[in-house]
Image (spheres, helix red, strand yellow):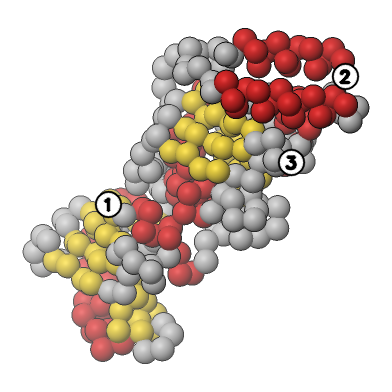
Amino acid sequence: MSRMGDVLAGFQATWEFESDSVLIRYERGMRTPKLLSALGERRIPLTALSGVTLTRGRRGTVVLRAEPRPGADPLMEAAAGQLKEGCDPYRLVLPAEREVLAEYYAEELRSRLPEAGSGPADRYLVPAPEAPLSFKAYDGKASFDGRTVRFRWFWTGASSAKWKAGDQSFAVSELSGVEWRSPEVFEGHLRLLRGEDGAVQADQDPATVVFGLGYGPVHESLPFAAAVLSAVRTRGPVAAVTATATGPRRDPADIAERIRHLGELHQAGLVTDEEFSVKKAELLAEL
């Protein structure tokens, strides 16, 4: 980084070196992991890094990797070590013949890192993906406007416990954190934490949406989790948006479908007469 604006291009990404940061631009294409394509570009302050490594990769490549400090990047905090190597946003893969050049930039980066910057960060230093964000899970749709997380259940996937609880709305001020379990492993889910003991099973917890069968993919659910996590950690004394806040009126066809499904649950004995009447009245009030 002898001068600002130096660029190092690798497979699937390009790093542009500035005096106080590295701007990483990810390519969009069939061979680029969807998570990296979704991120587009990220500016990583040097204060967010604890080190730099250069190692031999596969098939005649070398890998330059910037090591983020714990607590500096909400995306990596939400991922909690679950990302596959190819989806690591801090890796730059280069042809082996560019190893000398990569080593030069690795040394330049190391020389510019803050001497006392290897410990955990006391705040997020890398910007989180911007809201509004949304994705479809197996049992509902999750949306986040920057202040409130909302879960809207799908009658085809949601458990009776979630249907009985109704659609959920959580102000950032209510939350203490986020638990993301990759959809690429068994029992993947996104759970909103509220400092309560004894977590309920994911498919029964109204504060959790469940992944699986192609729902909740990494490139959609992980940026979502990171944005919520960042908002929770940086929230200020802003008035919370509650579940009773005024919003757009529901589609009558959607309400009718939900009442029909509620009736099926009632006939199956999964919902009591009283619960059926109360919930039906609530749905009709949304028209």
Q: Are marks 3 and 2 in contact (CB under 8 Å)?
A: no
Q: Would residue 6 be found to the left or right of residue 150 on screen?
A: left
The CA distance from mark 1 to mark 2 is 54 Å
> Which residue is drawn at the image coordinates 36% and 59% (left, top)?
37
Give above or below for 206 relative to 30.
Answer: above
> Which residue is drawn at the image coordinates 41% and 88% (left, top)?
59
Residue that protrudes farthest toward the right in the picture = 269
Label located before the other in sequence (1 or 3): 1
> Which residue is drawn at the image coordinates 54% and 36% (left, top)?
142
* Residue at the spot of label 2: 272
The CA distance from mark 3 to mark 2 is 21 Å
Q: Are marks 1 and 2 in contact (CB under 8 Å)?
A: no
Rendering coords of residue 68 (x, y %): 40, 57
Q: Would residue 22 be found to the left or right of residue 205 on screen?
A: left
- Label 2 SS: loop
Q: Is residue 195 visible?
A: no
Marks 3 and 2: which is nearer the front?
Answer: 2
Q: Would residue 189 be found to the left or right of residue 39 on screen?
A: right
Marks 1 and 3: which is nearer the front?
Answer: 3
* Residue at the spot of label 1: 43
The CA distance from mark 1 to mark 3 is 37 Å
* Residue at the spot of label 3: 203
* Nearer to us in this view, 21 or 217: 217
Marks 1 and 2: which is nearer the front?
Answer: 2
Identify residue type, mark 1: Arg
Label 3 Cα neighbours within 10 Å, binned few <14 / some 14-19 / many ≥20 = many
Q: Quadrant of the N terminus?
A: bottom left
